[in-house]
Image: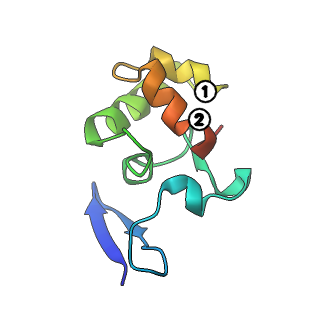
Amino acid sequence: MACLFLLSGSLFFILPHSDGQPVSVSAYFENEQDRVNVNKAPAAELMCLEGIGEKRAQAIISYREANGPFSCAEDLENVTGISDGILEKIRDDITF
């Protein structure tokens, strides 16, 4: 069974593993083209990253709208609420 979330007008699906348990984002993203593009992703997609809730997702969107696209993972540290620890958790799940 899949869970459907409606966040900020965007639909987003979270699919469980075949055993019915939730799976980390990195388990679904096997290559770069399947990673979350932090320069294009809506809040609902950003929120699937570990440690990124609604507030941090909106901060990422606000920062990129004000400052332009991110060019590397370290650029995310300029976003309020994104620490070294969070960056390390999401590094393998994002692309630019």
Can you identify the residue that label 2 sits on?
A: 91
Tell me if residue 65 can be seen.
no
Three-letter amino acid code of the residue under disc 1 = Ala
Q: In percent of the image, x 42 and y 31: which residue is there?
A: 60
Which circle, 2 or 1, is nearer the viewer?
2
In the rendered image, residue 49, in percent from the top left (x then y), is placed at 44, 46
Q: In percent of the image, x 38 and y 72: which residue is there?
A: 21
Can you identify the residue that label 1 sits on?
A: 73
Give the side of residue 52 with respect to residue 69, left or right. Answer: left
Compute the Cα span from label 2 to label 1.
7 Å
Earlier residue among tags 2 and 1 = 1
Task: In the rendered view, tell whether residue 75 sits above or below residue 89.
Answer: above
In the rendered image, residue 85, in percent from the top left (x then y), is placed at 45, 24
When asked about the image quadrant of residue 54, the answer is top left
Is label 2 in contact with label 1 (beta carbons under 8 Å)? yes
User: Which residue is situated farthest in the top direction here?
Assistant: 78
Taking depth in this image into account, of 30 and 4 the one nearest to the observer is 30
Disc marking residue 65: none
| Secondary structure beneath label 1 | helix
In the rendered image, residue 64, in percent from the top left (x then y), is placed at 49, 28
Task: In the rendered view, tell whether residue 38 sits above or below residue 7.
Answer: above
